Image: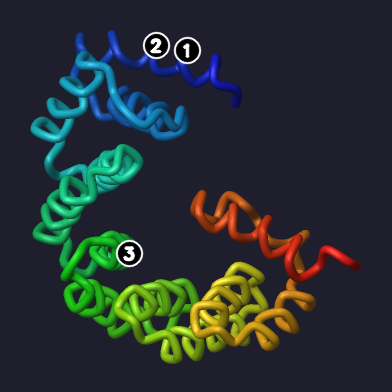
Amino acid sequence: MGAQQINDAIDFALPHYKDNGDANSATLFVSGLNRLGETSLSDEHAQIVNQILMNHQNNLDLLENVATLRLQHQDSEGAVAIFNRILKVDPLRIRTLNNMAMTLAELPGRASDAMKSVDRAIKLAGEDPELLDTKGFVLMKSGDLNGAEKIFRQAFNATQEPRFQFHEIMSLIAQEKQEQAKQSFRSLDVKRLNPAGLTMAERKQLETLKLDFRGNE
């Protein structure tokens, strides 16, 4: 879906939500804003999003979408507040615990809270590779690079998912294990590595590593 189609969907959902206040048009509206990828909201759109938060407090999927929007706009604290609201309703919600851990890990001094969140998710769901990948991210942010490397490798060995291998490579580079990182990168299935699953910073690092580690191939 192109940007014009997304804007059309937003423009369709907005008056419908104003007239009816229903969850379907609210979901279409927020999902459209997320897909549009703008870094800020107009005053009108921000006001509607706040109304949605007030009027649909028990629609957990919708709240999760709003939290994602907050993250997109660099409002990590706002996202954490929404995640906490969700977990008060459903404290066993794995997706939210995982997203909470990822968000807290980015905030100064919140690494231990992030670890508690992902460890709780793992206790509930088992050693799901996606959760292990999140734990590796939290370990990296807390400075335990060797622990992160081991967790990323465990996730990769369980799935052969190239995104997990790429994260392991990043942990190797952070430890200045350049030769090991280079060898691992050469075996990385870049064609199967979906850029949509990477952050913008990770996409940039991937392109840099292609030049550094495969430039002469």
Query: Circles 2 and 1: CB distance less than 8 Å?
Result: yes
Label 2 – label 1 distance at C-alpha: 6 Å
Q: Which residue is mark 3?
A: 102
Within 10 Å of disc 1 (Cα), the crowding (few <14, some 14-19, many 20+) is few
Q: Earlier in the sequence, mark 3 or mark 2?
A: 2
Q: Which mark is residue 12?
A: 2
Residue at the spot x=66%, y=70% of the render?
162
Q: Is residue 214 left or right of residue 206?
A: right
Label 3 – label 2 distance at C-alpha: 33 Å
The percent coordinates of residue 51 (x first, y second) are 13, 25
Q: Specify the amino acid type for callout 1.
A: Asp
Q: Quadrant of residue 90?
A: bottom left
Q: Is residue 40 placed above or below 66 in the rendered structure?
A: above
Is label 3 in a helix, a strand or a loop? helix
- Nearer to us of marks 3 and 2 is 3
Q: Is residue 69 placed above or below 83 in the rendered structure?
A: above
Q: Which residue is mark 1?
A: 8
The percent coordinates of residue 136 (x first, y second) are 42, 79
Q: Specify the amino acid type for callout 3.
A: Met
The percent coordinates of residue 25 (x first, y second) are 31, 22
Is label 1 in a helix, a strand or a loop? helix
Q: Quadrant of the C terminus?
A: bottom right
Q: Is residue 217 left or right of residue 37?
A: right
181 or 68, which is in the foreground? 181
Within 10 Å of disc 2 (Cα), the crowding (few <14, some 14-19, many 20+) is some
Label 3 – label 1 distance at C-alpha: 32 Å
* Number of numbered callouts drawn: 3
